């Protein structure tokens, strides 16, 4: 498949950038939540929560913005995905909401039982949210049953097939690695040393999961390698991804946590870029009837709407970037517990 640089492709890339931004930023949030119960003391768990406390809600701005962009540029995809994945979407939203409630409520009482309940809630909702995001990606790659009107004709349980679950587990592993590196970056002392020891295990877990997903994709989802086969120069994307992952333990060994975190961000970016490259020009693949797939052309708004929204996006994106940058600048440095902490 050759790539055509037109307005529809530009919007495909813009929506992709927004969801990549969400995966990078909220990915380490979900990773911290997944690792939360591995810590034992109340102080360590408070440090874990406070490492993401000032930024987690700002990170989710990227999800909201991405959803809005998807609705504006490709409304039929928005409609089909939200109707087809309705139950899964509700579970995801409940998970994200419950995670937020757990962060806010955990330290409201000194009771050990109270805090344990919210600790479990925080970790479980993070795992479920990460898993469901991966399951959604797995189904988009595998394809879902759509009729000639592009309406979903499957069931919720049909979405939980082995390939989608493998991608879901890989997503959990990726976010665990990403979150562990972020905690090392934001903490110091005993907790930092403890989490530093987890990083290699999370990298191994991710690499094994990624290898299994890659083999399953090549064997059972051959269309997800067609674009790179047709455009060999795009092989640079998975190559750079492997180099980014390989650089993480090197930077951690030399105690260059920020560089390790940048490498982790690059691996998330490149993985999703690879996913987008292989999906192009499809947005939702129909399986088994490929002709019913939603693409960047048959699911797009009018050209006039795309132009108007492009102008709005050009004006609005700097505001989102400025907001995100300012939050991270204000709350830079190591986490310290005080009376205003969670």
Image (tube, grey):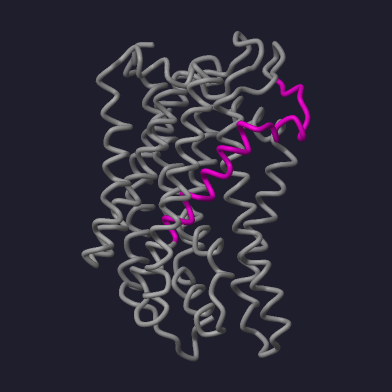
Q: Residue at x 78, y 30 (%)?
A: 155
Provide the major secondary structure of the magenta segment: helix
Q: Residue at x 42, y 43 (%)?
A: 20
Residue 33: image location, x then y, percent: 55, 64
Residue 97: image location, x then y, percent: 65, 60
Determine whether, in the image, residue 105 is placed left or right of residue 341: right
Q: Nearer the viewer, residue 193 or 323?
A: 193
Q: Residue 156 falls in which quadrant of the image?
A: top right
- Magenta span contains residue 88: no
Residue 83: image location, x then y, percent: 72, 32
Q: Nearer the viewer, residue 12 or 28?
A: 28
Q: Residue 288 falls in which quadrant of the image?
A: top right
Q: Residue at x 66, y 90 (%)?
A: 110
Q: Residue at x 63, y 12 (%)?
A: 292
- How many numbered badges does the structure rendering display? 0
Q: Nearer the viewer, residue 64 or 34?
A: 34
- Magenta span contains residue 173: yes
Determine whether, in the image, residue 260 is placed left or right of residue 310: left
Q: Vertical placement of 292 versus 208: above or below?
A: above
Residue 203: image location, x then y, percent: 41, 52
What stretch of residues is rendered in magenta? 151-179
Q: Is the N terminus in the top left, top right, bottom left or bottom right quadrant?
A: top left
Determine whether, in the image, residue 89 is placed left or right of residue 141: right
Q: Is the C terminus in the top left, top right, bottom left or bottom right quadrant?
A: bottom right
């Amino acid at each position: 498949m050759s790539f055509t640089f037109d307005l529809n492709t530009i919007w495909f890339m813009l929506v992709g950038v927004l969801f990549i931004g969400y995966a990078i930023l909220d990915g380490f949030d979900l990773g911290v939540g997944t690792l939360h119960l591995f810590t034992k003391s109340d102080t360590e768990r408070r440090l874990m929560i406070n490492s993401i406390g000032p930024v987690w809600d700002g990170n989710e701005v990227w999800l909201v913005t991405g959803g809005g962009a998807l609705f504006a540029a490709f409304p039929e995809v928005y409609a089909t995905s939200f109707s087809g994945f309705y139950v899964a979407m509700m579970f995801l939203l409940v998970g994200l909401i419950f995670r937020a409630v757990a962060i806010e409520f955990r330290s409201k009482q000194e009771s050990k039982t109270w805090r344990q309940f919210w600790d479990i809630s925080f970790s479980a909702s993070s795992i479920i949210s990460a898993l469901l995001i991966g399951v959604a990606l797995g189904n988009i790659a595998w394809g879902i049953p759509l009729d000639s009107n592009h309406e979903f004709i499957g069931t919720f349980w049909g979405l939980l097939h082995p390939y989608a679950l493998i991608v879901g587990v890989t997503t959990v592993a990726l976010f665990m690695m990403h979150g562990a590196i972020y905690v090392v970056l934001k903490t110091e002392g005993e907790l930092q040393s403890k989490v530093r020891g987890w990083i290699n295990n999370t990298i191994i877990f991710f690499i094994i999961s990624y290898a299994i997903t890659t083999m399953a994709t090549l064997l059972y989802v051959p269309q997800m390698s067609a674009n790179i086969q047709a455009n060999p120069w795009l092989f640079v994307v998975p190559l750079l991804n492997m180099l980014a992952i390989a650089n993480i333990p090197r930077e951690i060994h030399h105690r260059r946590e920020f560089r390790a975190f940048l490498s982790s961000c690059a691996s998330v970016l490149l993985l999703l870029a690879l996913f987008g490259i292989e999906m192009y020009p499809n947005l939702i693949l129909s399986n088994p009837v490929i002709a019913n797939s939603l693409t960047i052309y048959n699911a797009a708004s009018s050209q006039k709407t795309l132009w108007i929204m492009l102008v709005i996006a050009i004006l609005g994106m700097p505001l989102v970037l400025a907001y995100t940058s300012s939050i991270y600048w204000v709350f830079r440095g190591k986490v310290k517990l005080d009376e205003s902490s969670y």
